Image: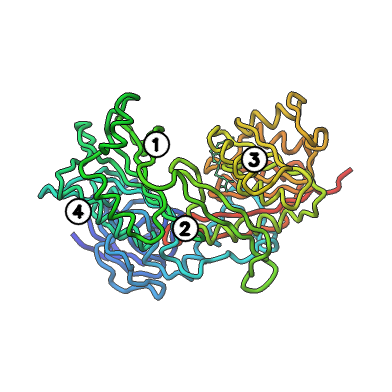
Amino acid sequence: MSRGTGEAMDFQKNDTVTVTIEDMDSDGQGIGKADGFTLFVKDAVVGDVVEARILKNKKTYAYAKTEKVLAPSPFRVEPKCPYHRQCGGCQIQALSYEKQLEFKQEKIRNNLIRIGGFSPEDVDACMEPILGMEHPFRYRNKAQHPVGRDREGRAIAGFYAGRTHTIVANTDCLLGAEENRQILEILLDHMDRYGISAYDERTGSGLVRHILIRKGFASGEIMVCLVLNKKVTKASCSRLRTDGFFQRQEEFLQRLSEIEGMTSVSVSINTEQTNVILGREIYTIWGQPTISDTIHVRDMSLPGCPFTGQKLEFSISPLSFYQVNPLQTEKLYSLALAYAGLTGRETVWDLYCGIGTISLFLAQKAKWVCGVEVIPQAIEDAKENAARNGITNASFFVGKAEEVLPGFYAGSAEVAAGEQMRHPDVIVVDPPRKGCDSACLATMLQMRPEKIVYISCDSATLARDLKVLCGGGEYKVEKVRGVDMFAQGVHVETCVLLSKLNVK
Ligand code: SAH
């Protein structure tokens, strides 16, 4: 059944309806109205008129899916990737990049107003224009692909179709490095040629589960890690290293080594029935165990943001956390540093510090920096990275920010800059999507830093936390700026500067 928007609305599943898309929700779905009834329409962009099929009816609103674009939006572009609808990784690829940036700027603004409770005037007064990308494709330095077999039994690699574990074969994700395709094809060809099995998660059998590829964009170094479902004992390990973890391993490595930049090839052992991709045991089978990459800070105050002298080198293993969009990371870190406004005399906390990337940049301009991170391996990497870059004025703590910080404030930890760290000049936070724990926010307020720099990958939890930080009237939001790290997708990174008000 098909009908126009003028008729009485009691949609049934599979009805089709003509709808004009007036807005987009934070997940990138189009929003349109039909007689006061709100429709969330998949694969539609703002400005489109589409014929949509109802998927689910919820009384006052419904979910629908675009069947046909009747009149395309002026902001609609032809998606470059043939799989963008199935994949779900690039929710807004059909929107022009300029409009994507506008969408993200609005998303941040709306969350600050709706969730943060800030007035539109205040938000507009402190919001700076979002920092977009020059080239919004091929920006990811990391690719992770599940490996399986198609109906004809050929080896495939690709991605899981939205909300399922069915692999859609695609060896050329347009967000990833050019080399990925060649690497994947070598693997698949090798598996087919020598009958190497792919993992089947229903039965828990088969060898090759996933392939992880990382590239240092500044260094050009490439790492390949194959995740294998293979029991390895201490005794069998040395034999496997010479005989190979799979058939004709030498030949496979030979082909990979011909790719320019190939630096490290390893296998990761994962025999668990789990969605976690990498196993903890990693064996290097060719080249180095790690790759290196450089991050270079920019001068955000000058047009075109030229590089400054500040530069750091990091070593990355298959298990390390490392930002996936290196060019935008340089802008994000530069912005955070500019907001921190350090002169060399300050004491700084860097909470949720990962492998210490931001901490080490801060340390180059501060008296002392303390980093806090919950993953022990990341803290080991942070210490190693400090040594590698000759940085001696940073210390790192393993633990939850909401436990380490209150513990420190209460006086249970000793550190070089001692008492000054209890009342630091600056606190930088970069939490995961769920934002900061309330115990962490409460201690930050007690510590009374002059500045707080909040980096966030979810502007909804950011807005919630800013409401707490500013709620007591002691802090004010000075500046807010979006950085687009995930072009074609709906996520956006935000950096906020808060300053202490001089209240009596
Ligand atoms: N600032 C780093 C990492 C940011 S990602 C960078 O730019 O590279 C967020 C980090 O917070 C992750 O490394 C995660 O392991 C860590 N994390 C998550 N929950 C935490 C908690 N409660 N306390 C401290 N660190 C936490």
Of the two numbered discs 3 and 1 on the same chain, state the one appearing first in sequence.
1
Alpha carbon distance from label 2 to label 1: 29 Å
Alpha carbon distance from label 3 to label 1: 28 Å
Name which residue type carries label 4. Asp
The answer to whether 73 is drawn above or below residue 24 in the figure is below
Q: Relative to residue 207, is residue 103 drawn left or right? A: right
Q: Which mark is residue 262?
A: none
Of the two numbered discs 2 and 4 on the same chain, state the one appearing first in sequence.
4
Q: Nearer the viewer, mark 3 or mark 1?
A: 1
Q: Relative to residue 259, is residue 219 drawn left or right? A: right
Name which residue type carries label 1. Ile
The residue lying toward the viewer, choosing from 113 and 328, is 328
Residue receiving disc 3:
351
Mark 3 element type: strand
Residue receiving disc 4:
189
Q: Relative to residue 178, is residue 54 drawn left or right? A: left
Q: Are marks 2 and 1 in contact (CB under 8 Å)?
A: no
Mark 1 element type: strand
Q: Are marks 3 and 2 in contact (CB under 8 Å)?
A: no
Alpha carbon distance from label 4 to label 1: 24 Å
**Ligand 1 - quadrant of the structure image:** top right
Q: Which mark is residue 486?
A: 2
Bin the neighbour count of mark 4 within 10 Å (Cα to Cα): few under 14, some 14-19, many 20 and up: some
Of the two numbered discs 4 and 1 on the same chain, state the one appearing first in sequence.
4
